[in-house]
C-alpha cells in the first residue's frame, strides 16, 4: 500500500505542479531575481556545455507538446523580442516548477520509511534535475537574443520613421 501511495503522490504532485506553474504570476518570473540569475560557478554556461546539455536537451520530454495551455518552447523563423522574452519567463517558470518538485520529493520518504523511500525520493529529484539544467543553460542565450532583437527592432523603427524617400 505504501508503494501505491508513493506512486499516487508523485503522479498528483506532477499534475499539481503543472497547474501551479501555469498560475504563477509573471511578476514572480523575472530573470533578474536571485533564484534565476546565473551563478559564478556556471561560468557563463561552460559547465553545462561540459555535460553536453546541447546534445541531449532536445531529446527530453517537453510538456508543451502535450499541454496546449503551455507556451511552445520553439523559436520561430523570425522571432520578435517579445516572443523571446516570453521564453525567458517560461524558463523561469519551468525552473521554479522543477525545483519545487525536487523540494517536495522527500515527502515520498514518509510513505516508505526505509531504503525504498529514499530511492523513490532520490529518483524524483534525479528526474527533475536535467530540466533545471536545461532552463539554466537556455535562459542566458535567450536573454542575449532578446536584447539583440530589441536593438534591431529599435533600429528598424528609427529607420522607418526617419526615412526620407
Image (cartoon, rainbow, N blue to C red):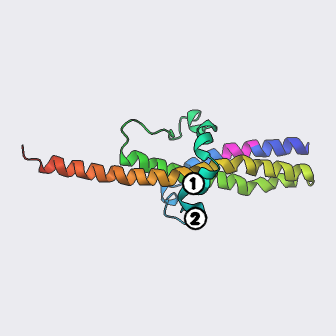
Residue 112 visible in the current orientation: no
Q: Which residues are magenta?
A: 11-16
**Can you tell which quarter of the image residue 6 is in?**
top right
Q: Which mark is residue 20?
A: none
The C terminus lies in quadrant: top left
Q: Position of residue 48 (x, y in %)?
A: 60, 53
| Left or right, residue 77 beside residue 123 | left
Left or right, 109 with reference to 74: right
Q: Is residue 12 magenta?
A: yes
Horizontal and vertical percent position of residue 96: 61, 55
Question: What residue would you read off at disc 2?
Answer: 39
Mark 2 near mark 1, Cβ–Cβ under 8 Å?
A: no
Relative depth, front residue between 84 and 140: 140
Circle 1: element type: helix
The mark nearer the N terminus, 2 or 1, is 2
Q: State whether residue 134 appears in this view.
A: yes
Please tell me which residue is depicted at 55% across the width and 66% down the height of the picture.
34
139 or 11: nearer the eye?
Answer: 139
What is the residue that sits farthest to the front in this orientation? 50
Q: Residue at x 60, y 41 (%)?
A: 55
Give the number of callouts: 2
Residue tagged 1:
136
The secondary structure that most of the magenta stretch takes on is helix
Number of residues whose C-alpha sits closer than 10 Å to that of mark 1, classed few (under 14), some (14–19) or many (20 or more): many
Please tell me whether residue 151 is drawn above or below residue 57 in the rendered image. Answer: below
Q: Secondary structure at mark 2?
A: loop
Answer above or below: position of 36 versus 150: below
Residue drawn at point x = 80 percent, y = 52 percent: 122
Is residue 132 covered in magenta? Answer: no
Residue 128 on image: x %, y %: 69, 48
Amino acid at each position: 500500500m505504501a508503494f501505491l501511495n508513493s506512486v499516487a503522490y508523485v503522479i498528483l504532485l506532477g499534475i499539481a505542479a503543472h497547474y501551479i506553474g501555469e498560475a504563477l504570476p509573471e511578476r514572480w518570473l523575472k530573470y533578474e531575481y536571485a533564484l534565476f540569475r546565473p551563478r559564478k560557478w556556471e561560468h557563463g554556461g561552460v559547465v553545462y556545455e561540459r555535460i553536453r546539455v546541447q546534445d541531449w536537451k532536445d531529446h527530453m520530454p517537453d510538456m508543451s507538446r502535450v499541454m496546449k495551455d503551455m507556451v511552445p518552447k520553439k523559436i520561430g523563423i523570425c522571432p520578435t523580442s517579445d516572443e523571446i522574452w516570453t521564453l525567458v519567463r517560461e524558463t523561469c517558470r519551468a525552473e521554479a516548477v522543477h525545483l519545487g518538485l525536487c523540494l517536495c520529493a522527500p515527502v515520498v520518504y514518509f510513505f516508505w520509511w526505509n531504503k525504498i523511500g529514499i530511492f523513490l525520493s532520490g529518483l524524483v529529484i534525479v528526474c527533475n534535475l536535467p530540466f533545471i539544467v536545461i532552463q539554466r543553460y537556455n535562459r542566458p542565450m535567450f536573454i542575449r537574443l532578446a536584447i539583440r532583437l530589441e536593438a534591431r527592432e529599435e533600429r528598424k523603427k528609427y529607420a522607418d520613421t526617419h526615412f526620407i524617400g
